[in-house]
Amino acid sequence: MSWFEQKLQGRDPSELEAELGRFVRAAGVDRALEQMCGPYGCRRFVIRYAVMNGSVSLTDLETHPLPFGGGPPDPKGAEDAFQPLAAAVNRLHQNMRTSLAWSRGAVAVLRDAEGRMQIMPLFDEDADEAVLADLEMPGPPGHPLEGMMYKDRVDANEAGMAAVHGETSRRRGSWSGWTISDDDATLVLNHTTGTSRHRVRVLGTFHPTTSRFMWATDGALFDEPAYTCRAYSATMDAIMELSMATCSRLGATWLFMESMNDAGDLVLAAVWD
């Protein structure tokens, strides 16, 4: 008989599942796993742990890269979340020891490209049966900024991106005000010595409060998921990289980026001189 079946004790399975969910949240296991997954991207992995010498230790991570990008935890997220996850799993063991005791466990994690996340805790005999290959795929599609196609494009434009970055850094902060024409074709910068006009193409907007990027072009600039997908979650650093690469591919000189409202939302545009 499985651990789950033993603990049912005549209850409806949904009741025990809900109780396990409360234990996971109270211990902070969900928050540590979200940190491990990083701010965006598809994830598919199984973490195992066991009681050793009175405390719970993480013993194994089973994962594999997905063919469309993602799969393993985010490298920085995994590094930052290792200790918090170990502490959270120990709290989980303490909280459950009087009502739903266990000596070993596993948690399966799935997150799709839209950030929808599933956390499946398993214990004792059930944990022994947890196999990565049995988990469903959290896509395709994968997250637009995780696939090899995107990474290859960034690598191919490294020199152009460096030039765009250098020119962007040189110009940054040289104006006191700005406007973009109604047709999104002209950028007017106000300087202490006057104004300058530049050919511009608005690329998109980034919303820091929701970590969401949205293209503002009439159509996809290129026939790749990073461009055909019109909106997705991302970090500021990732969007800067995407925008620099886009400027390079369009032949633009530099990247214009400024706050466009009190909420701190940013407009990004490719500029030619």
Image: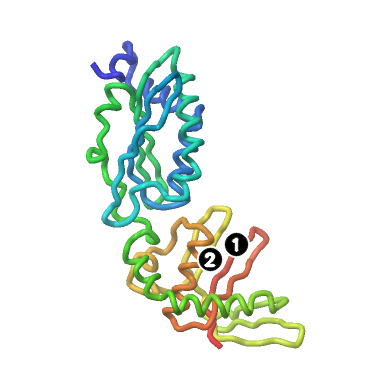
Q: Position of residue 182 (x, y in %)?
A: 58, 79
Residue 207 picture quarter: bottom right
Q: Quadrant of the C terminus?
A: bottom right
Q: Residue at x 58, y 84 (%)?
A: 186
Residue 250 picture quarter: bottom left
Q: Position of residue 189 (x, y in %)?
A: 66, 81
Towards the viewer: 12 or 122: 122
Q: Residues within 10 Å of mark 2 (few under 14, many from 20)?
A: many
Q: Quadrant of the N terminus?
A: top left
Q: Position of residue 253 (x, y in %)?
A: 52, 83
Q: Position of residue 25 (x, y in %)?
A: 48, 30
Q: Indicate left or right for 133 with 230 as reference.
A: left
Q: Residue at x 33, y 60 (%)?
A: 147
From this viewpoint, which residue is outermost toward the right? 192
Q: Residue at x 48, y 19 (%)?
A: 94
Relative to 112, residue 148 above or below: below
Q: Amino acid at mark 1?
A: Asp
**Residue assigned mark 1:** 265
Relative to 191, residue 30 above or below: above
SS state under label 2: strand
